[in-house]
Every structure is written in C-alpha cells, then in structure tokens.
Amino acid sequence: MSDLNVHTLTDAVIARMTDKVEPRTRQLMSALIRHLHAFATEVSLTEAEWFAAIDFLTRTGKNCTDTRQEFILLSDVLGLSSLVIATNHPVAAGSLESSVLGPFYLPEMPELPLGSDLAVGVAGTPTLYQGLVTDTDGTPLAGATLDIWSSDGEGWYDVQKPGPLKPAARGRIRTGADGRYAFWSIKPADYPVPTDGPVGELLRAMDRDSMRPGHLHFIASAPGCETVTTQIFASDSPELRRDAVFGVSDGLIAPFVSHAAGTAPDGRVLSTPFCTVDYAIRLRRA
Amino acid sequence: MSDLNVHTLTDAVIARMTDKVEPRTRQLMSALIRHLHAFATEVSLTEAEWFAAIDFLTRTGKNCTDTRQEFILLSDVLGLSSLVIATNHPVAAGSLESSVLGPFYLPEMPELPLGSDLAVGVAGTPTLYQGLVTDTDGTPLAGATLDIWSSDGEGWYDVQKPGPLKPAARGRIRTGADGRYAFWSIKPADYPVPTDGPVGELLRAMDRDSMRPGHLHFIASAPGCETVTTQIFASDSPELRRDAVFGVSDGLIAPFVSHAAGTAPDGRVLSTPFCTVDYAIRLRRA
C-alpha cells in the first residue's frame, strides 16, 4: 500500500468504486473526490484547519431544525444555490427567471380567492400585487398558480416566530380566465439571514454583509408550462447589489409604487399608505 | 445584477470578501468556493442531487455524538483524512509514518508502568508489543511516550459499548532508560466502520467495503522530536489492501507472531496462545 501518497491517493479512492456503481453516482463521486482532494492539496490544508472544518460542518448539522436549514443557508451564502439554479434554469429571453427557494417555504398552503389579502394582521405596508401571466408568446394563461410566501414588513417569517405556527403572508392564488392575478400582502422588508449559527461565523470571517434585499417569494406554475421558483425584489432596496445569497437578477426587480391612504386600484379603501406592484410573468411552454 | 450568471457567479462570490479578511481565510475560502462551484458546474448538479447532498450533510451532522464523529468518518472514507496527513507529514526515509487518528481517541488516559497489560479482561489474543524507540540516527530515546488505543479482539472499542465508559485497551507507556517499550494488549481484529449512518449509505452507493484491517493506534512522542499519530497493522489481515479509510502504508505493517500457551519473552506465563510483535519506532528530531 506504499503507493498511497499525495500523488496517488485520489485515483486510488476513486478506483475503489466497482463496475456495479450506478453511472451517475460514479460521475458525481469521482468529481467530488477529485475536487475535494484538489482543494486540500492546493491550499496545503493543515490538520487544525481540517479539524475546524469537521467541527464547522458538525455544528452546521446540529443547527438544522424543522424550521431552520443551516446547510441550505451555507449553500446560499457560498453562491452554490444560485449556481445550481442558474445551471438548471438557463435564462430564456423574456421568460421569468429563477431564484433560490430559501429555507422558509411551506408546501400545501391553501388556495385563496383572486384578490385576497394573504397578510391580514401582518406588520408592514399593505401592497397590491397584480399582473398578467402569459406564455412567452404573450398568450394569457388562465388557471396559472402562484404559490406565494414572504417575510413581514419587519423582516420576519411566520416560521421564525415563537409558539405554534400561524401561517402568515402565505397562500396560493390562481389567475382568472383573462390570465390576470391579484392579491394583497405587505411590502417585505430587508432582513439579515440568521447569523447566530456557524454560517454567521463564516460570514464574519469573510467580512461579509448578512442582509437580503426585501423580496416576495413565489412558485409560478401553469398547465403545459415550466414551473419557476423565484423572488421579486423591491427596486428601492439599498441591499439589491449585496444580497447575501446572490439571488437578485435585473429581471426580478420590481418597482413598488407608494400611494397615500385612499382607494386602491381594486376598489379597496385603505386608511394607511399602501403600495402597488405591477409585475408581468411569462412562463415557458414545457 | 444581471451579470450574476454561471460564468460570473464564482468570481462575484469571492469578490464579496473585503480587504479586511485574514489572508489565510481568504485563500481557503477562495479555493473552496472555486472548487465547490467547479464541481457543481462540471457535473451539472441537478436540484434533486443538490437537495440530496443537503439532506446527507444534515443527517451526517445529526449522527455525530460525544462518541461518534460521522463527519470524520466521511472524511476518512473519501480519503481526505489520509491526504491531509500525507500533506502535513511527508514521509522521511526510515522515520515512523503517520496515519489517521480515527474517531475513537480519548485524551488523558493514565500512564501505566512499562510492561503493563492495557487489556485486562478484554476479549482477544493476548499480545506482547515491544521494541526500541530511537531518533532517526538510531539514538535510543528514554522517556518517549506511546499513547495507545485499539479495538478488542472482536473489533469493538470501549467507547462503542453501551453503558458508562470503562476504558479498555488504552493507556500510556513510557520507554525506559534504554529507550525500549513493552506492554501487553490484545491482537486487534478486523472490523467494519459504522455503516448504520449516512456514511454507510454512501459506501453502499459506491459499492465499497466497510472493513478496516486490524490495527493498534498510538501517538508516539518524545522531548525534542516530532509527535506522530499512527497505527500498526497486522500483516496477516486479508483487509490490508482494501482498508475503508486508506490508512495503511507498508512501513506500518507489523508481523504478529503466534505462540502456543507458555512463557512469554518477558517471563509472563500464559495458559492460552499469545502473540508477540516487535516494532521499532524512529522519530524525527523537531
């Protein structure tokens, strides 16, 4: 076994996989082992650094709970999540771009009537979101679904609050026969990613900001079209160019228009200032 | 931010580190981000595979306890641990080679008198380990310490057994004025690394064996010399060439000589068969 040295070890580890290994698994593990070893060799990783990495990964796993996924956050702040999304959803001219799912999505939220307020009693500036959903040829898509979630106007998601979960600023809206959607929620605030765990330590070591520009998450789907997981960002956020998780692209920035108290375009009368967002969504045919 | 695409994202993530970042941290994180992104791009990592990796790492963290370190095991089976050791402890002709620490080391075990039995009542063939500790010039090293631990003769470490820890097959031995060491323990058995966790799943996906050849761990140290963490392996193990953690090198293979019941070289009278191992240890001057 004296052939196992820094020059031969990588190939030896890969060669341990037999012919029975599923081809994609072989491809993934071969590439992983090569890059992992190349990284350690390139930086001459010390044993203390290796152990710090073991400890970091262990604590990252321990920090994961039902409502917090520290490894997804790690992937997000290292730009890996955005890279995987960009690889799997190449931008096509004019169609809705993808962005990161993030850690706060909850499946199977109820479908609410068109025009509903998803954020009754939630802190923040009431905002009417509306627009037309079409395919890339401009044909309106009736019955398209938007599965929506966001923080409140102070930057907190419902799942982050203590006590039993009370879903807020979440829900599904379906477009009408004309392909248009409309719903009320709040204007999401800029907020920091959680920095009280290992990923926070890493961000500080890299002297990086933890802020995300305010954004509304949604998953857009329609029969016969590709489903898109994405976010839209408020164009007036000072954090747009330093998103801690690299989720912003130009096509996902939407103007939030401010209005004084009064009657909104859908006839709702508000006693406080409110915003409106018009955002057109174009989905690709599958 | 439309410049954030698969071609520009890696540099953009690295560029977020400011001038204030400690240079070694910058080097490590830059290389890590580059290799991580290069891996994902090279294999066109799918979102399902990405999520499977998140889930795997999370469960690996959750599997770590006070007596089990699943991330070290992961590093071991991917050959990373051996690579880091080989990088940091280049082999010098004639001096003791390093090997992986493994997950079962306990610090601060008691020092026992020269010739002690470290494994009273432990299952396995009694084995007398003895030899001379010298520097690489052959000068005997009085007062050199061997910090020893191993599985029992059935492949189990004390820390793996249920109930309160009763240290067994562990202890420190110091060389005498002539630089010689001697102690009794058992002949360690071949055993599998733990396969009931995420790393076991990975080994099965790679169609790999989980066995380690029987081995005795020790950390050899002496005033003025470099400390070496290593293992010696029984030369008759059928697992020598397929160690699951890539820890074997030729210089660490030792013959275990079998004897019928009777009087051992140190005068101990045994009513059962026993083994003797003569293994010379050469340490480099620091």
Image (cartoon, coloured by chain):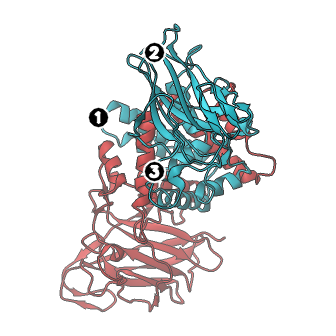
Chain colours: A red, B cyan
Q: Which residue is mark 3?
A: A79
Q: Which mark is residue B141?
A: 2
Determine whether the residue tagged by mark 3 lies in a helix, strand or loop: loop
Q: Give the residue displayed 46% in from the left and 84% down from the top.
A: A109
Q: Give the residue displayed 43% in from the left and 54% down from the top.
A: B66
Question: Label 2 marks which chain's residue?
Answer: B
Check disc 1: other Cα within 10 Å, few if <14, some if 14-19, many if 20+. Answer: few
Residues at discs 2 and 3 in contact (Cβ within 8 Å): no
Check disc 3: other Cα within 10 Å, few if <14, some if 14-19, many if 20+. Answer: many
User: Relative to B143, is A9 above or below?
Assistant: below
Camera-side residue of B211 and A166: B211
Q: Give the residue displayed 43% in from the left and 83% down from the top.
A: A171
Determine whether the residue tagged by mark 1 lies in a helix, strand or loop: loop
Question: Label 3 marks which chain's residue?
Answer: A
Q: Is residue A181 visible?
A: yes
Distance, label 2 to label 1, CA atoms, is 48 Å
Pinpoint residue B81: horizontal percent, then vertical percent. 54, 37
With B233 as the anchor, is B169 left or right in this view? left
Distance, label 1 to label 3, CA atoms, is 20 Å
Determine whether the residue tagged by mark 2 lies in a helix, strand or loop: loop
Quarter placement of the C terminus of chain B: top left
Q: Give the residue displayed 38% in from the left and 16% down from the top.
A: B224
Decide which of tag 2 and tag 1 comes sooner along the chain.
1
Residues at discs 1 and 3 in contact (Cβ within 8 Å): no
- Tag nearer the camera, 2 or 1: 2
Pinpoint residue B34: horizontal percent, then vertical percent. 50, 39
Q: Which residue is mark 1?
A: B19
Question: Same subunit under labels 1 and 3?
Answer: no
Name which residue type carries label 1: Asp
